[in-house]
Amino acid sequence: MLPVPLKLLDRYETQLTQQCIEHAQRAHYHKWLRFYLDFCHKYGFAPDDSRSLPLFLEKLRSKRQPDWMCQQAREAISLYWETLPVVAPTVASPPHSQYRTPLRLQSANIVPPHRPTCGISEPSLEKPKLTGASWVALYDGLNSAIQVRHYSPKTLQAYTVWIQKLQTFTKSKDPVLLSMDDVKAFLSFLAVEKNVSASTQNQAFNALLFLFRHVLEKDFGQVEGVVRAKRRKSIPVVLSREEVDRIIERLDDPHDLIAKLLYGCGLRLFECLQLRVQDLNMALDVLTVHDGKGKKDRTVPLPQVLRPALNAQIDKVAELHAADLAAGYVGTFLPGAIDKKYPAAAKELPWQWLFPAKALTRLPDNDGHKRFHLHPSLVQKAITVAVRRSRIPKRASAHTFRHSFASHLLQANYDIRTIQELLGHSDVRTTMIYTHTAKPVTISKPKSPLDF
């Protein structure tokens, strides 16, 4: 990495002081400046060329840098530009420019000065490129559209991956030039060349549909002439009650309790890990699932056999929470804007995770720490090891406990509608798949009622 001139560092440090950047954060700003100058040197950009910022941010995103780091890098480079001599009067940037004003400058109603482009026009005024265009603004628009509709972070992650694949397939064609022909060619490529499953191709289709409707604001139209992956119905893997017990016996605390809740309540793994202390109603023997799949809430019966273990788990959470508060613990992570509406809620016991993580998470904004819940991968790995040690010849996973829950209720002659409500399915046809995993308990041979 190229060394940064001392005079430039002095001017930049003065700029950070004038903008009241905290001392703890200045090292990060200097780091982004070094990375940016090295990027410009490597790819032949002048450091004062405004076209380099979107490409630099796109490079960071390709390296899986989180959004808050990209935003910090954007502001660090903007402050660096503030140290350069202004060669034109202060004017507002073009409305469709790829360069965006940092949030800190927006809040202060300060318009950044026009930057020299070394004789090259602004990107928004250039002719759309057939290849090599920047998609940074497109990803920013996708992020905003997902957050406005309160979709889950997993949806954003999945849609981002598919749009990145579309960008690679079209060789970074300018988003303005994207058409239905590109969509058809991409979906056909997935089915023919990549041989993906029907569910994978449908997920890609939904991602592109969202992109066109809510980000590009284009008519998606009819998708005809696309080679579709052949859909096949797969029967879910189901464990017997004996196999369930054998796996749980080989799990350590708290993974064994998590597996019991997955099987005893029919929960999805992320629904179980997102449980909070207040979601357990011991008086009514009810467990409440908040923000399940599709942002739906539901209640399920609480297994009586788990009451002692759940009470013991709540006591462990209370002890850990008290120790965290004594150590200056900021609080837990809260959904939405609850932490702003109720500032004290993050430190209250009812809001704590039922299965907290062992390590604290450091906040990027300040030196505070919060505690998150257990990571799903830890539970999945523990269950995989337990299945292997129990020598069960089945492809069992964390979700297999949910399949077993529904199948065993159906074998016990419970109504399919009741099982649908307990699982949180929107359509009973989704629940009907378990009719293939349960033994029939009803009389199948037809007989006249007169002969009863």
Image: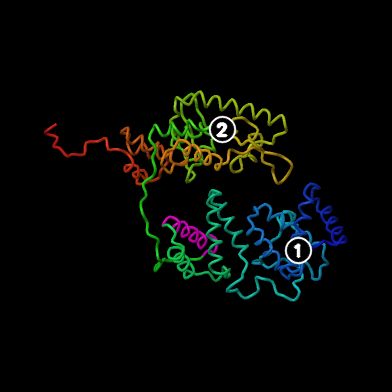
- Percent x, y for residue 7? 88, 61
Q: From this view, report whether residue 228 is shown above or below residue 431.
A: below
**Residue at image x 66%, y 61%?**
59
Three-letter amino acid code of the residue under disc 1: Asp
Kindly identify which residue carries mark 2: 354
| Residue 370 shown left or right of residue 162 in the figure | right
The residue mark sitting in front, 2 or 1, is: 1
Let me know if residue 202 is in the magenta part. yes
**Residue at image x 69%, y 43%?**
363
Q: Secondary structure at mark 1?
A: helix
**Residue at image x 48%, y 44%?**
293
Q: Secondary structure at mark 2?
A: loop
User: What's drawn in magenta, residue-wise?
Assistant: 198-217
| Residue 395 shown left or right of residue 36 in the figure | left
- Percent x, y for residue 39? 73, 64
| Residue 130 shown left or right of residue 325 in the figure | left
Q: Which residue is at the front of the view, 103 or 156?
A: 156
Checking the image for residue 38, the label placed there is: 1
- Percent x, y for residue 195? 43, 61
Q: Tell which circle, 2 or 1, labels the residue nearer the N-terminal end.
A: 1
How many numbered circles does the render carry?
2
Chief secondary structure of the magenta portion: helix
| Residue 10 shown left or right of residue 119 in the figure | right
Let me know if residue 267 is in the magenta part. no
Three-letter amino acid code of the residue under disc 2: Leu
**Residue at image x 11%, y 34%?**
450
Local packing at callout 2 (Cα closer than 10 Å; few below 14, some 14-19, many 20+) is many
Distance from disc 2 to disc 1, alpha carbons, whole Å, reads 46 Å
Q: Which residue is at the front of the view, 234 or 271?
A: 234
- Percent x, y for residue 151? 53, 50
- For the residues bearing labels 2 and 1, Cβ distance under 8 angstroms: no
Which corner quadrant of the image does residue 399 belong to? top left
